[in-house]
Image (tube, rainbow, N blue to C red):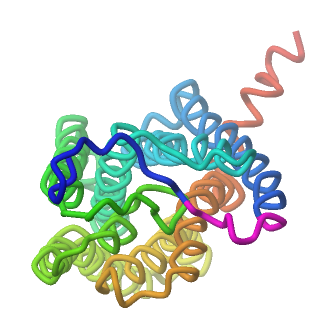
Amino acid sequence: MDGTNGSIQTHFILLGFSYRPHLERILFVVILIAYLLTLVGNTTIILVSQLDPHLHTPMYFFLTHLSFLDLCFTTSSIPQLLYNFNGRDKTISYMGCAIQLFLFLGLGGVECLLLAVMAYDRFVAICKPLHYMVIMNPRLCRGLVSVAWGCGVANSLAMSPVTLRLPRCGRHEVDHFLCEMPALIRLACVSTVAIEVAVFVLAVGVVLSPLVFILLSYSYIVRAVLQIRSASGRQKAFGTCGSHLTVVSLFYGNIIYMYMQPGASSSQDQGKFLTLFYNIVTPLLNPLIYTLRNREVKGALARLLLGKRELGKE
């Protein structure tokens, strides 16, 4: 509902990169390939974690949720983006925009908290190895994941309606390729100071608090690892944490830039490319990071693809 004229807002126009049509054609091919690889990579992680008994551990339980989250995240926006890139029609329905915004905010919040949960899992594994299976019992794992999903959804329920109800004075051209909150805030024809303050406060709670927890957890992990006398033991301990730290760096580097500053002050072109990276490149790289750096996942893939050696000898 547009607050200025009482008429029902039926659609938005996602401008995206329409001022650079040649770039759209290139991006369509690149993003389509990346999206398909993202689907294959994250689906593989989920299947391997579920099918191989060796991976039925808390770490891979959380990794399965991260891969499922990435699948949902990319699918909530990339198909619409490809549709807009492939023709002159840049429209998205009001309901489609609302769903896209809700999922973008909700899933982003879940990922922040889920990465913090995974950091806690690594902290227990390295600092309290003898009590790991007792502390990280199935009930606690399910509870931590439920809290992450619940807080992410609550964050989205708080911010999505406020953003969508801002008076736009008939403006419906979104200078972005998806219905992302800072881009929608820019359409408002009233002061947005209050909502920008609210966004900042929620960002501190949903984005920065998990990051502080992650950094604190890894400070204890590093201290514990440095006390390990065996060089191979230290290497193994750092190896189990390296993948998670890489994913955290990729995720938080983009999310902090986008959401820890007011919507009107950020560079629009810079924001588009960072959102694109956050939306497709990070979910694409996550499976590669966890498979290329993880012997357990590579071993599980080999067992599933090649079969057990015992079966091959028979």
Residue range of the region highlighted in magenta in the rendering: 15-23
In which quarter of the view is residue 293 placed? Answer: bottom right
Q: Position of residue 92 (x, y in %)?
A: 48, 43
Q: Position of residue 57 (x, y in %)?
A: 41, 40
Q: Residue furthest right?
A: 313
Q: Give me the residue at 27% from left, 72% from top.
A: 207
Residue 21 highlighted magenta (yes or no): yes
- Main SS, magenta region, reads loop
Quarter the C terminus occupies: top right
Q: How many marks?
A: 0
Q: Nearer the viewer, residue 186 or 138?
A: 186
Q: Residue furthest bottom?
A: 265
Image: 91 above or below 263:
above
Q: Is residue 191 left or right of residue 104?
A: left
Q: Give me the residue at 45% from left, 81% from top.
A: 228
Q: Give me the residue at 60% from left, 68% from top.
A: 277
Q: Position of residue 260 (x, y in %)?
A: 30, 83
Q: Is residue 269 left or right of residue 86?
A: left
Residue 43 highlighted magenta (yes or no): no
